[in-house]
Image: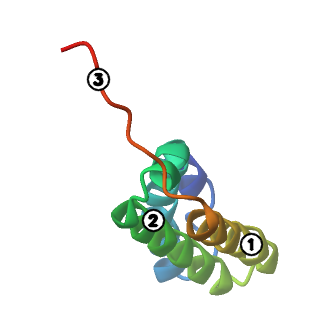
């Protein structure tokens, strides 16, 4: 899904802008698909990957410039970071059938 989004606008702006979006969208979308476990289990590695992907997307759109893309993706990046930071630390499920 993320790759399709990036490819649909690959020629918008300079080549580096397309490259940043081509890398950023799949990384960010992979994290979004796993978002609830990332927040629940406090997966900092996935959070960092997501935020770097979102930053790449925002920079890629800023270089076009397409400010609506920067605003939408930047807003989600901030919301996601706040959500992760504000969520209580969850408990991992325990397999009691053993």
Q: Residue at x 67, y 85 (%)?
A: 62
CA–CA distance between discs 2 and 1?
15 Å
The disc placed on residue 75 is: 1
Q: State the separation of the CA atoms marked 2 and 3.
A: 26 Å
**Percent from the top left, x then y, of residue 52?**
45, 74
Look at mark 2 in the image and give the residue it sits on. 47
Circle 1 crowding by C-alpha within 10 Å: few under 14, some 14–19, many from 20:
some
36 to the left or right of 23? right
Evaluate if marks 1 and 3 touch, with contact meaning CB atoms under 8 Å apart.
no
**Nearest the eye: 64 or 93:** 93
Answer above or below: position of 34 versus 31: above
- Residue 1 visible, this orientation: no
Query: Where 1 sits versus 15, above or below?
Result: above
- Residue 49: % across, % down: 40, 67
Sequence-earlier tag: 1 or 3: 1
Secondary structure beneath disc 3? Answer: loop
> Foreground: 5 or 43?
43
Disc 2 vs disc 1: which is toward the camera?
2
Dot 2: element: helix
Q: Which residue is mark 3?
A: 95
Mark toward the start of the polypeptide (2 vs 1): 2
Q: Mark 1 and mark 3: span between their CA atoms?
A: 38 Å
Whether the residues at callouts 2 and 3 have beta carbons within 8 Å, the answer is no
Label 1 SS: helix
The quarter holding residue 43 reads bottom left
Which quarter of the rendered picture does the C terminus lie within?
Answer: top left
* Residue name at image x 62 percent, y 86 percent: 63
Percent of width and height locating residue 60: 57, 78
**Residue 82, how many percent across, how many down?**
65, 71
User: Can you tell which quarter of the image residue 59 is in?
Assistant: bottom right
> Measuring 46% from the left and 52% from the top, which residue is drawn there?
38
Whether residues under marks 2 and 1 lie with C-beta atoms below 8 angstroms apart, the answer is no
């Amino acid at each position: 899904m993320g790759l399709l989004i990036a490819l649909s606008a690959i020629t918008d702006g300079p080549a580096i802008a397309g490259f940043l979006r081509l890398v950023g969208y799949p990384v960010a979308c992979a994290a979004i698909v796993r978002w609830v476990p990332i927040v629940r289990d406090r997966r900092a590695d996935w959070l960092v990957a997501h935020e770097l992907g979102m930053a790449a997307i925002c920079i890629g759109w800023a270089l076009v410039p397409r400010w609506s893309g920067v605003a939408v993706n930047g807003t989600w990046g901030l919301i996601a970071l706040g959500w992760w930071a504000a969520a209580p630390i969850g408990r991992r499920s325990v397999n009691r059938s053993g």
